[in-house]
Image (cartoon, coloured by chain):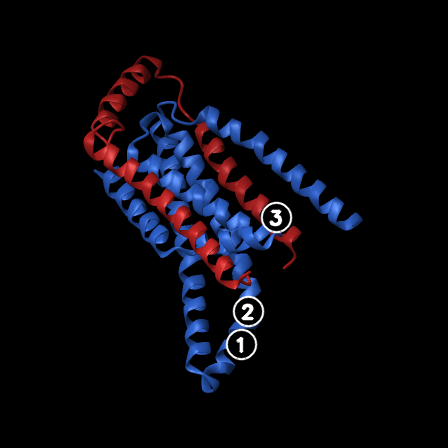
């Protein structure tokens, strides 16, 4: 499979992934405007209880832990490359 | 040279077309419609499914190939057979992972109003994996290729990504 065919198939699938939600979203019912605002407020309240918000203790631990883990991985990779290079280069 | 130039023009064209399509969907997202929100949530499941389908066979194939090479001459034939299907499976891995990444990112952007630390961490780890994969695939310099290969195959990052996905699903379901 040539790279251009991969890109083409990827584009078709991505377009489907992006377009399908938009098509369904267009069918929304606009008649019930009064209830729409109420529904939004209710949903906002529901979502406030969801997840681990940023700024809380557990939230900070997860976020900074992830960033630290990525930093350590990148540093370890760089260190490994450097040490391999040093070993392979001839001593003067 | 001319074919390469045409390919790049085609890639840029498709990229721009995708960028034109994304804002349309974002405009309809998270506007208070339950059905639309369900569809956006389903995008997350598309990302999870694509990730599993892209990575489990690829990792299994690599492990089997390494084991076959390690054990010696009797299993060398298996390693050779795997080598012939390596390229298509790699392309499949790249394609499905890209679909999963963009589906996941769209899901995240559409539900960005309810952003939490697990989702943010997940987006960061996914982006790091994607960038290292791109480095590995498209960079020609030896050092960046080695860097991409080592970073992309880090077991710790894979475990971190998998646990964040599980945590995101558990927290999102509550």
- The chain drawn in blue is B
Task: Note whether B63 is above or below A9 in the view shown.
Answer: below
- List x then y, in percent, for residue B161: 34, 48
Which residue occupies 27% across, 28% down?
A: A54
Residue A51 shows in this picture: no
Q: Which residue is mark 1?
A: B81
Q: Which colour denotes chain A?
A: red
Q: Which residue is mark 3?
A: A7
Which residue occupies 49% across, 37% down?
A: A20
Which residue occupies 44% across, 37% down?
A: B105
Quadrant of the image containing the C terminus of chain A: bottom right
- List x then y, in percent, for residue B95: 53, 52
SS at mark 3 in the image: helix
Question: Which dot marks residue B85?
Answer: 2
> Do labels 3 and 2 touch, CB within 8 Å?
no
Disc 2: which chain? Answer: B
Residue neighbourhood size for the residue with mark 1, other residues' Cα within 10 Å, grouped as few (<14), some (14–19), many (≥20): few
SS at mark 1 in the image: helix
Question: Gap between marks 1 and 3, in whole Å?
Answer: 27 Å
Residue B11 falls in image quadrant: top right
Question: Gap between marks 3 and 2, in whole Å?
Answer: 20 Å
Residue neighbourhood size for the residue with mark 3, other residues' Cα within 10 Å, grouped as few (<14), some (14–19), many (≥20): some
Q: Nearer the viewer, residue A6 or A40?
A: A6
Residue B43 falls in image quadrant: top left
């Amino acid at each position: 499979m040539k790279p251009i065919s991969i890109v083409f198939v990827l584009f078709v699938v991505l377009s489907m992934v992006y377009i399908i939600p938009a098509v369904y979203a267009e069918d929304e019912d606009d008649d019930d405007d009064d209830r729409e605002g109420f529904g939004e407020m209710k949903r906002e309240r529901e979502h406030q209880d969801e997840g681990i918000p940023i700024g809380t203790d557990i939230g900070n631990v997860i976020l900074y832990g992830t960033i630290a883990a990525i930093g350590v991985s990148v540093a370890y990779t760089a260190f490994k490359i450097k040490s391999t290079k040093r070993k392979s280069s001839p001593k003067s | 040279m001319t074919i390469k130039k045409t390919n790049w023009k085609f890639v840029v064209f498709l990229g721009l077309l995708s960028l034109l399509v994304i804002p349309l969907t974002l405009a309809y997202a998270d506007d208070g419609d339950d059905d639309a929100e369900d569809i956006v949530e389903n995008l997350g499941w598309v990302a999870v499914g694509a990730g599993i389908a892209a990575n489990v066979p690829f990792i299994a194939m690599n492990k089997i190939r390494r084991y076959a090479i390690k054990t010696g001459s009797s299993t060398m034939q298996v390693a050779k057979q795997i080598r012939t299907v390596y390229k298509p499976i790699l392309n499949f891995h790249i394609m499905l992972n890209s679909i999963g990444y963009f589906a996941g990112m769209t899901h995240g952007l559409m539900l960005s109003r309810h952003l939490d630390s697990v989702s943010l961490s997940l987006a960061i780890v996914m982006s790091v994996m994607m960038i290292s994969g791109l480095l590995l695939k498209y960079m020609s310099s030896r050092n960046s290729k080695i860097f991409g290969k080592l970073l992309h195959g880090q077991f710790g990052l894979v475990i971190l990504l998998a646990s964040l996905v599980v945590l995101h699903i558990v927290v999102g379901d509550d």
